[in-house]
Amino acid sequence: MQKPFDLTKFRTGLTKSISGISAGFHDPKDWISTGNKTLDYLISGDFNGGIPLGKVSVFAGESGSGKSFICSGNIVKNAQDKGCQVVLFDSENALDEQWLQALNVDTSPEKLLRISVSMIDDVAKAISEFIKDYKANYGDLEYDEMPKLVFVVDSLGMLLTPTDVDQFNKGDMKGDMGRKPKALASLVRNTVNQIAPFPIALVATNHTYASQDMFDPDDKISGGQGFIYASSIVVAIKKLKLKEDADGNKTSSVQGIRAACKVMKSRYSKPFEGVQIKIPYESGMDPYSGMLEMLESKGIVEKVGNKLSYISPVTGEEIKEFRKAWTDEKLQIVIDEWGQNPIAQEDVPEDIDPEVLEPEMEDYTDES
């Protein structure tokens, strides 16, 4: 009988002899919350999920839409809570220590390294050096023994190429002749390959611009499509006005923003689903914002008269309340039970409109 080829031995020799190559599967083991349970679920298919380590996630939106709040604030804070160290690349020079501390981010040097950058090349070189040192010191350890690290780039849209800098110095502003999209794609593609086997994540924000395509009205993400193809998670964010108080009553003045988030790409859940997350100026993001609407759209919570009803599949008990009386505590009960008895997408009742979660275009034009 012919002796089988020793794949294990070949794998070990291959990964040690060739730089930038890894073997085997690298399914995510660690997830970092975005600060909103509905968005976490839409991205990862798990209320306790969010963005995965070992992958690249991109949050794109217009100025003031909440992308820095989610990435440089919530994700950094929640990453630190999970024992991750964070390297924060600030290309906009807009992340003040006081603002980060107000979002409960630990800004101590051993937990957070903020680096002010202006060029894509500088980010690429810094990440390359970090990963090279990481591999040398921890590459032979078991996954669970490796230190966790999160890179945050805020934002890709403000990064420059050497051509931009050279032309600025010469006073000849002709543009970078298409070099930036190629540079961004190269940055993300190389990072994807380097971090895949390790508990390291890259989270980046980017800018969007209004679509001129009447058949595809979604805002377009700047920087080309190359880096989007390499990313595991892509979330588009639209800025809408929040005109209601803490009790849900309509007001004439703006009380905050509604971040209309749509998951454009996800390898772990159904794409093109969205949620409107309320971020009041006074209290910040509500972790349960948009949850009731999502549960209602999936038929988990149903409208009965002028109230919303949920019947527990575990105890058979009913929670029946007016919409405003559905508190975070009641929503958590549904989340805990539904997590144990998930309803598959194909089991969603046919009369439920799948578009109900997507931000309405009227909101984009009337209130943005």
Image (cartoon, rainbow, N blue to C red):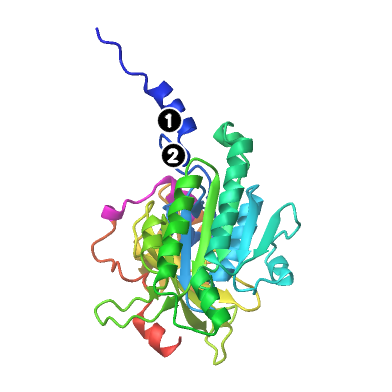
Query: Quadrant location of the N terminus?
Result: top left
Q: Residue 130 in the image: x percent, y percent?
A: 61, 49
Q: Which residues are magenta?
A: 335-347
Determine if the magenta segment contains residue 344. Answer: yes
Q: Mark 2: which amino acid?
A: Ile
- Residue on which disc 1 sits: 14
Residue furthest to the top in view is 1
Residue at 43%, 54% in the rendered image: 189
Residue at 55%, 44% in the rendered image: 199
Q: Mark 1: which amino acid?
A: Leu
Q: Residues within 10 Å of mark 1 (few under 14, many from 20)?
A: some
Q: Residue 8 in the image: x percent, y percent?
A: 41, 23
Residue 277 horizontal side relative to residue 296, left or right: right
Residue at 51%, 75% in the rendered image: 164
Q: Residue 42 in the image: x percent, y percent?
A: 42, 59
Considering depth in this image, is 283 or 190 the residue closer to the camera? 190
Q: Is residue 182 above or below residue 241?
A: above
